[in-house]
Image: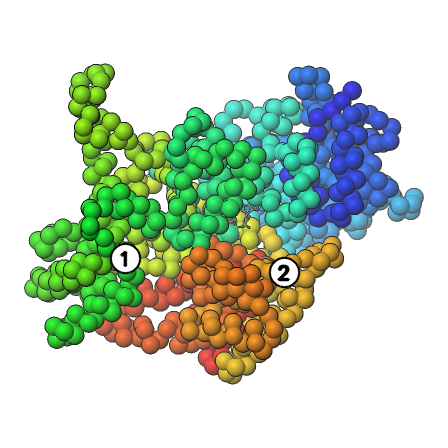
Amino acid sequence: MTARLSLYPKAEQELYKLDRSVKATFYDFSDRFRQNPRHVSLKLRPLKGNPKIHSAWLDDSYRVLLTRTGTEPNGDESWLVIAVRHRRAVYEQLSVAVNRVTGEIEFVDLSTVGESALRRAGINLTPAEPEDVSAGTTQATQPQQPAATEALLAGYTAEQLSELGVAEPLIALALAVTTSEELDQLVKNAPLLSQDVLYGLAAQMPIEDVRAEITARVAIEEPVDTDDFTTALARTAVTSVDEHVAAAIEQGDFRAWKYFLHPTQARLVNRDYSGEARVSGGPGTGKTIVALHRVHHLAKQLPPGQNKPILLTTFTKNLTTDLRNRLASLLEAQPELMDRVDIVHIDQLASRVLGENAQPGRTRNRIDDKVALAELRTMLFELDERAWEPEFLMEEWEQVILGQSIPTRSAYFQARRAGRGRPLTRPERNAVWKLIEQFTTRLDKAGMETWGQASERAARYEIERAARITARQSYKDELGAQDLRHRDDGSGMRYLNHRYRHIVIDEAQDLRPAHWKMLRAMVASGPNDMFITGDTHQRIYDNQVALSALGIKIRGRSSRLTLSYRTTKEILAEALKVVDNQNFDDLDDGTDTLNGYRSVLHGPAPQFVHYDTWQDELEGLATTMRAWHEELATDPTGAPRDPRGLVAIAVAERDKVNEVMYYLTTKAHITCAELTKDGPRGDGMVHVGTMHRFKGLEYQKLAIVAASDGILPRTAAVEAYRTQDPARYERELRKARALLFVATTRARDALTISWHGKPSPFLPS
Ligand SMILES: Nc1ncnc2c1ncn2[C@@H]1O[C@H](COP(=O)(O)OP(=O)(O)OP(=O)(O)O)[C@@H](O)[C@H]1O
């Protein structure tokens, strides 16, 4: 009798953490098990407490816990590995069941839920293999104690928890816990739906919201037969044990995201949307992971041989490289799918469109906003024009005129200027229009254009192209099925189609209105056309949009992820204080929140360190770097490891980046790699860059330096707006806050924030 063996996600994660030698034994074990699950050497036997669960011997110390999930069509037995444990950590009170909401197999291990909660619920644990007779029972033998304070979930009943999908063995415990520490312990290893529901209720989400936002999102439509393990196995994200998984486990858990999506993530990835869809969520909740899996999901369904019908785009160049690498890794087993995906950052895409439409002999140099501002300043100086600040005019041009594609002076007289603060009278608008017209003519003559202008032009070309496609289609519809060859020939229309079938956009919060218009025109409206991920709390540029005004309708197709896979609870708690009580938009006319945003990871509390001078701060930084370097030079098993790129320093001010690198290299002999637009330059030990460069990245340990008052926010740059343009002032402060929020949430395990002089007002007090 042979067997097919699958791995439950938790079991695979447990395997990641085991010693190399135990992992190797596991593969030997699985080979033997697949040959003959009843072989005596495996010592397969049901647990007394739950005959559905079997224990088998991996070696003298470790046990593999399995459950039978039916019989394969070819007659093979089907088994699922639910845990790999030291024998002393195996108790009779293990449970495996089919969840009545998700229809998936769930494993619950009460030995990990914490002694005090067990005691409160009066549950005694029995080791499956007692060391000796006297130790035959319990970890929680004390009689049940009366609850010291009110139960945390006092307002709920067992029926309600069950209906919301909490695993049955956890319900009594969940109703008994009285502190959030007990709840943490309880949910630490609980099935994901139980975790989400219990945390949601404990966070005082109304039960209807928990039902709608958590339970309903993972509930399956067909009725669930809780005895049918075969069907349940097909619904459960398990991995079959083969060479591929062996390699993944060998490499450690940093590849876990490739195989296991949280059920809420999986739902978003695999759903059919009737149009544009949007996924929001705090830092580290897996938005990028979801975007990558979505690309995979879409690519799989396309017929082979098509030429890059999916666009995957993001705001910055270095993130594009990161997306390309991660997608290649995700599609490792099907590299041909990579050919169906065009990965390009948004400005590069606009450049491509402009290149295709270029008129011979008419090239323009694209200039960044700083160069443009200098040019505008020069022009105002030459004109002796003192009524308008160049910064105000640039913003008006970018946000209002370019942002809404305003073509004429009279259209500008009527334009909405929401969020611009200072109102403008008609004569003032006239003056502004005139100056901006002069400025664009000046740029044009000098053969220059800004990225804002370039993306507007690209959007216009794409909108015109989309209009031609629609016109051709209506003409074709009018003629019935007749061939349009005679009409298309010579007009170049025959091959005109939308550029993409699907567009997936990451870090969407920073795109300009023109980018959105261009993207919208590049794909036909219809099911699964655009998939948008982003977090407006992390907007660090000025491009606020209302997607509905740009023809992108996400209402009714928006979802939010709330569980952080990156940052520890301790770091998250401090990061959240940075953006607390601020208003954030939802890429449309509504607002976004971080309610329910949480982590189940624990780590050391972030360090906040004050220094008197910048010199002292640099010395302190060098000490921290040396300590971190030492800690990271070996992996958790004690094996040597290359710590390059695991640590980074985010600097609050551009000028100080070089000073940090110079100091560390020359005085502390720590090599550095500067984070540039194209990613890290060189292979130095520590990555150093301004906070802007950290968007979308993550590091095991992170130091934020120069977080001083006057630098964050830059008083010299923003103070003037306080009275002159309060709306802009608020916007600048919000951007600076977002920048600090982005930086703090890049850290996985350790975070140090330091400053010299007075601390930044945005730092949690
Ligand atoms: N289902 C998962 N299993 C394991 N790890 C995951 C999962 N989802 C996300 N992660 C990990 O969490 C981290 C953050 O994921 P990701 O970068 O997608 O988050 P994000 O929401 O895009 O973050 P940000 O907004 O900060 O850019 C990554 O290390 C990723 O591998």
- Specify whether residue 58 is in view: yes
Marks 2,1: beta carbons within 8 A: no
Relative to 642, residue 60 above or below: above
| Marks 2, 1: nearer the viewer | 1
Q: Nearer the viewer, residue 262 or 142?
A: 262
* Position of residue 555 in the picture relative to residue 442 (left or right): right
- Residue at the spot x=22%, y=48% of the render? 457
Relative to 357, residue 101 above or below: above
Mark 2, residue position: 643
Q: Is mark 2 within 8 Å of ligand 1?
A: no
Q: Quadrant of residue 466?
A: top left
Relative to 180, residue 667 above or below: below
Q: Residue 162 location, x and y as percent? A: 58, 36
Mark 1, residue position: 366
* Position of residue 357 in the picture relative to residue 653 (left or right): left
- Residue at the spot x=17%, y=23% of the render? 487
* Position of residue 732 in the picture relative to residue 111 (left or right): left
Q: Residue 548 location, x and y as percent? A: 27, 44
Residue lying at the far bottom of the rendered structure: 612
